[in-house]
Image: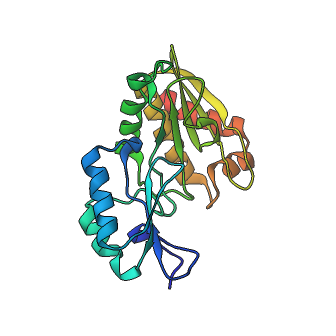
Amino acid sequence: MAENIPEKGASLQKDMKTYAIIPYIAGGIIDPDELRKIADIADKYYVKTLKMTSSQRIAMIGIKPEDIDNIWDDLDMKPGGFTGARVRPSKLCPGSLYCKKGVQDTIEMGMKIDDIYCGLKTPKKLKIGVSGCVNSCAEPAIKDIGLIGTPKGWKLLVGGNAGIKPRIGSLMAKNLSDEDALNLIGGIIDYYKANSNEKRLSSFIAEINFDNFMNDILNNHNSS
C-alpha cells in the first residue's frame, strides 16, 4: 500500500491501513451547509475523526482505501492537502473585511492567489501566507512566500520555512499593489520552477544567495 496517493489527495496514516484526505476550503471559510455536508459524509463512511489543520482546512482521518474515490465524489471538492510538490492553498487571516486591525483585504487577495497559482507543480511544495496587518496571524514570515498588509500596500517576504531548518523570510519588496504583488508571486514561482533542483524555496535561495535571487526576480518584473 503506497504511503501517499497524491493524485487522490490521500495520505496513509499511522495504522498503515487507513488514509486521510483534506478537502480544499478556500481561505478556511466555509458555510454551515458545506460543514454539514462534510459531517454527513463522514458519518456515511464511518470516518470518526475530523481534524482542523494548521492550514485552515478539515482533515478527514481514518478512511478505508476503497472509500477514497467515493468520498471525493460525494464531497465534490478538490483536494486541499496531500497534493505533492505543488503550490498549496493560501493561508489567510480575516484581514480588513472582518478584523478591526486589518489594513488590507486578505480574503480577496488570497482568493486571487489561489485562483491563479494554487495547484501549480513546483520542485517542492510551496506555501503562501497572507496577513492583513503586521501582527502576521497567517504566519507569512515562515512561508515560502508571505504577504503582510500595511497602509501603503503589501510587503512581500520570500524564502521562509517552518520545517526541519526554520528560516524567516527575507523582504523582497514593499508598498505593492494587489496587481504588483500577484505579478511578483508569479515571477518567483516561474523562476523557482525554472532553476531549482528539487529543493524547498528557502534552500534554493540560500544556495544561490538571496541578493542574486532578488535581483533576477525584480529585474524580470521591472522589465515586463
Q: In the rendered image, which quarter contains the C terminus? A: top left
Q: 101 left or right of 195?
A: left
- Quarter of the rendering containing residue 157: top right
How many circles with numbers are drawn on the protein? 0
Asked if residue 224 shows in the view, the reply is no
Q: Is residue 128 above or below residue 174?
A: below
Q: Residue at x 66, y 47 (%)?
A: 161
Q: Is residue 63 above or below residue 50?
A: below
Residue 143, given in percent of the width and then of the height, sits at 60, 43
Residue 128, given in percent of the width and then of the height, sits at 52, 43
Q: Residue at x 50, y 27 (%)?
A: 222
Q: 213 left or right of 13?
A: right
Residue 104, given in percent of the width and then of the height, sits at 45, 22
Q: Residue at x 27, y 51 (%)?
A: 34
Q: 140 left or right of 208?
A: left
Q: Residue at x 58, y 36 (%)?
A: 140
Front residue of this view, candidates 38 and 214:
38
Query: Hey, which residue is sitting farthest top in the picture?
Result: 151
Front residue of this view, candidates 29 and 177:
29
Residue 105, given in percent of the width and then of the height, sits at 41, 25
Q: Is residue 41 above or below residue 24?
A: below
Asked if residue 211 shows in the view, the reply is yes
Q: 113 left or right of 203?
A: left
Front residue of this view, candidates 35 and 69:
35
